[in-house]
Amino acid sequence: MNHSVFSEDRLRGLIRAVPDWPEPGVMFRDITTLLKSPEGMSMVHETFAERYRDKGVTHIGALDARGFLLGAPLAATLKLPLVIFRKPGKLPADTICEEYTLEYGKAALEVHTDSLSAGDKIVLIDDLIATGGTLLAATKLVNRLEAEVIEAAAIIDLPALGGSSKLKDEGIVSFTLTSY
């Protein structure tokens, strides 16, 4: 393993800003340029792995879809089960569903009912925290399965959109590598 030392400046240099996407006035933070960098992704993965190693976490929860890119390698590195939270209709077995509000409408997340049990401790991971809706919905699903969210993690926080504040108000600790 490379054992990269985390550098926020290096990370920020690998995240592309795309003005006026998906609509005018929005500055989109694009991680596809980070994904193209093996060294950058190694730094991200190792930073998350170091944070959650030996913290009593029993599961890693990855949010559809970019969270899968972070959750799968993190779960493998920490030798923990991966729980995936998907858009409705994507999981084949028995699921529970939680609806949430987006800036432009409603969406929902589902998880398999057998993915967590009472007493499990999970870290939820996604690419960014914007309005917090997806992470809040995932937390509600975790709670319905009688498990506990230890932390919500992401590469990027967009604090102006209020998501990290909403998470904090709900008692959910969040951790991000950078914010814009």
Image: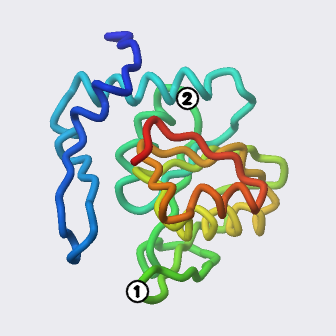
Is 175 situated above or below 97? above
Image position, residue 5 (x, y; %): 39, 13
Residue at 35%, 23% (x, y): give it: 43
Identify the residue position indicated by label 2 in the image. 79
Image position, residue 80 (x, y; %): 58, 35
* Residue type, mark 1 in image: Tyr
Q: Nearer the viewer, residue 161 or 112?
A: 161
Image position, residue 117 (x, y; %): 77, 55
Q: Nearer the viewer, residue 125 or 17?
A: 17
Tags 2 and 1 touching, CB below 8 Å: no
**SS at mark 1?**
loop
Q: How is the image coloured?
A: rainbow
Which tag, 2 or 1, sits closer to the chain's start? 2
Q: Answer left or right for 120 relative to 135.
A: right
Among the 4 quarters of the image, the one containing residue 171: bottom right
Residue at 41%, 29% (x, y): give it: 45
